[in-house]
């Protein structure tokens, strides 16, 4: 599944929250691997994403390794392909 990183767009509003801790708090699987489809590194970075399909405006939090976390901020279209078992945590949950 392709998702688009929107962490930069939302940075000013939500920069005070630690999205990696948030993701770990709500995810059901105890393993904390990077959500990218081919990556087996440990996640150390939380990112805010939207699904690429235009009819879904929901915002989710995913966990990424440091490398993918940096890359997604730098690539032009800010998209990343997620693993089928990646956990997308709804952005609006209350801690
Ligand atoms: Zn990765």
Image (cartoon, rainbow, N blue to C red):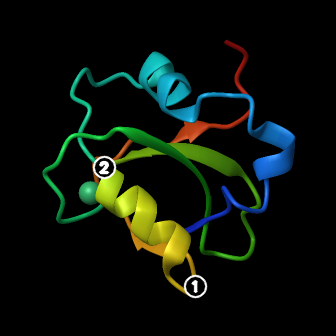
Q: Categorize mark 2 by other alpha carbons within 10 Å: few (<14), some (14-19), many (20+).
A: many
Image spot of residue 71 (x, y percent): 41, 70
User: Which residue is farthest bottom?
Assistant: 76
- Res 94 visible: yes
At 84% from the left and 48% from the top, the residue drawn is 12
Q: In the displayed structure, would residue 24 be above or below residue 65?
A: above
Q: Quadrant of residue 56?
A: bottom right
The residue indicated by pointer 1 is: 77
Image spot of residue 89 (x, y percent): 54, 36
Q: In the displayed structure, would residue 65 be above or below residue 52?
A: above
Q: Is mark 2 within 8 Å of ligand 1?
A: yes
Asked if marks 1 and 2 touch (Cβ < 8 Å), the reply is no
At 55% from the left and 24% from the top, the residue drawn is 22
Q: In the displayed structure, would residue 4 be above or below residue 95?
A: below
The residue indicated by pointer 2 is: 65
Q: Secondary structure at mark 1?
A: loop
| Quadrant of the picture in which ligand 1 is shown | bottom left
At 69% from the left and 28% from the top, the residue drawn is 17
Q: Quadrant of the N terminus?
A: bottom left
Lower sequence index among marks 1 and 2: 2
Q: Secondary structure at mark 2?
A: loop
- Res 35 visible: no
Image spot of residue 88 (x, y percent): 49, 43
Q: Quadrant of residue 30?
A: top left
Q: Is residue 48 left or right of residue 1?
A: right
58 or 25, which lies in front?
25
Q: Quadrant of the C terminus?
A: top right
Q: Is residue 38 left or right of residue 92?
A: left
User: Which residue is farthest top?
Assistant: 95
Image spot of residue 90 (x, y percent): 63, 37
């Amino acid at each position: 599944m392709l998702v688009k990183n929107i962490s930069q767009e939302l940075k000013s509003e939500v920069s005070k929250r630690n999205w990696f801790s948030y993701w770990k708090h709500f995810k059901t699987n105890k393993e904390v691997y990077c959500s990218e489809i081919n990556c087996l590194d440990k996640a150390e970075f939380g990112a805010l994403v939207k699904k690429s399909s235009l009819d879904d405006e929901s915002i989710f939090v995913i966990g990424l390794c440091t490398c993918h976390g940096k890359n997604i901020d730098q690539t032009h279209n800010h998209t990343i392909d997620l693993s089928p078992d990646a956990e997308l945590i709804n952005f609006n949950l209350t801690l």
